[in-house]
Amino acid sequence: MTLRVPYYLVPRALSGVNATMATFVTTGSPTTNANLSNSSGPTTGNADFYAWGLNDIKDAGTNPADVRGIGVQSFPFNATNQLLVFAVNTWNRWSNAATNEFDIRVDVNPAANDGDDYIIVGADQGAVQTGTFNGRMAAFVFSTHSPGASVNFFATAPTDSSTALLPVLSSQLCRAGEPCLSGANPRLTYHAVSFDVTSNFVDVVAGTAKYNAYSSSITQGDFVTVPQGASGAVPITITPAEWAQTPALGTMIVTLDNKAGQKEAALLPLQLRP
Ligand SMILES: [Ca+2]
Ligand SMILES: [Ca+2]
Ligand SMILES: [Ca+2]
């Protein structure tokens, strides 16, 4: 796989990738297509696929920390790690993502009833590590059981945009002696809160999502380039047995080159019917 953790320094031409999908599949026929087109944009766009987990309303005003939707994708990273990437889409454009803080609270052993175990924090890397803001959002992982944070990746969170991609490794969700996400314990729940660090704005994201980081209940992780004028279809499959344990809201397709705001992330509901 290719890691995508660049930091874009300049605004670029916009793409117009659009996506549509049927609203349900059935247990006997659990596959449909996400139909992509890029007819309105002057430039190529990419369609980056996530299991859509959280949905949140537009708050009053135009705060860049106002969350709209959150999804997650995951890949094998090396012999011992799974890479998880959380995508946070907001309703409003930011100048710099690092004026926001996105907290994704993760419970890797919900059945134990010991609450959230880890907090994935998208925040200004300089502010967290040196006390001085540097305008670069990174993906930190804190534990609710012990002090300190780990960080392996910067966020992909372009300037003048509204979607942040937060990559973390499964090992960061598995501290010694603490609840541990692993191939043997692959499921997690997550919920989220966002903050504008320059004001008092806080957005509690509605709901709690479930996800299997080693075997998702819905297709995710595809990354498709859609040139100007092109269209095509990407199959989306629900796995009914896993869906029963970790259902998603549907598919989230991120296109960072689309216009900021809701056009940067298609949120496509999908249900499984008998
Ligand atoms: Ca909101
Ligand atoms: Ca827990
Ligand atoms: Ca909210």
Image (cartoon, rainbow, N blue to C red):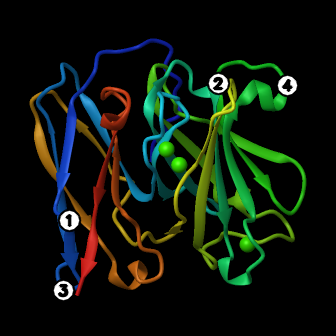
Instruction: Kindly tell me whether residue 269 is visible in this rendering.
Output: yes
Instruction: Kindly tell me whether residue 212 is visible in this rendering.
Output: no
- Contact (CB < 8 A) between labels 1 and 2? no
Under mark 1, the amino acid is Thr
Q: Position of residue 85 (x, y in %)?
A: 53, 49
- Contact (CB < 8 A) between labels 4 and 3? no
Q: Quadrant of residue 208?
A: bottom right
Q: Is residue 252 left or right of residue 147?
A: left
Q: Categorize mark 1 by other alpha carbons within 10 Å: few (<14), some (14-19), many (20+).
A: few
Secondary structure at numbered mark 3: loop
Q: Position of residue 99 (x, y in %)?
A: 63, 25
Q: Categorize mark 3 by other alpha carbons within 10 Å: few (<14), some (14-19), many (20+).
A: few
- Contact (CB < 8 A) between labels 2 and 3? no
Q: Give the mark nearer the N terminus: 3 vs 1.
A: 1
Q: Position of residue 31 (x, y in %)?
A: 20, 71
- Contact (CB < 8 A) between labels 3 and 1? no
| Mark 1 vs mark 2, CA separation in Å | 37 Å
| Mark 1 vs mark 4, CA separation in Å | 47 Å
Q: Give the mark nearer the N terminus: 2 vs 4.
A: 4
| Mark 3 vs mark 1, CA separation in Å | 16 Å
Secondary structure at numbered mark 2: loop
Q: Is residue 171 left or right of residue 2?
A: right
- Specify the farthest residue to the front: 60
Residue 76 to residue 2: above or below: below
Q: Nearer the viewer, residue 222 or 195?
A: 195
Q: Quadrant of residue 24?
A: bottom left
Q: Residue at x 49, y 57 (%)?
A: 75
* Label ID, residue 23: 1
Q: Give the mark nearer the N terminus: 4 vs 3.
A: 3
- Residue under circle 2? 136
Secondary structure at numbered mark 1: loop
Q: Give the mark nearer the N terminus: 1 vs 4.
A: 1
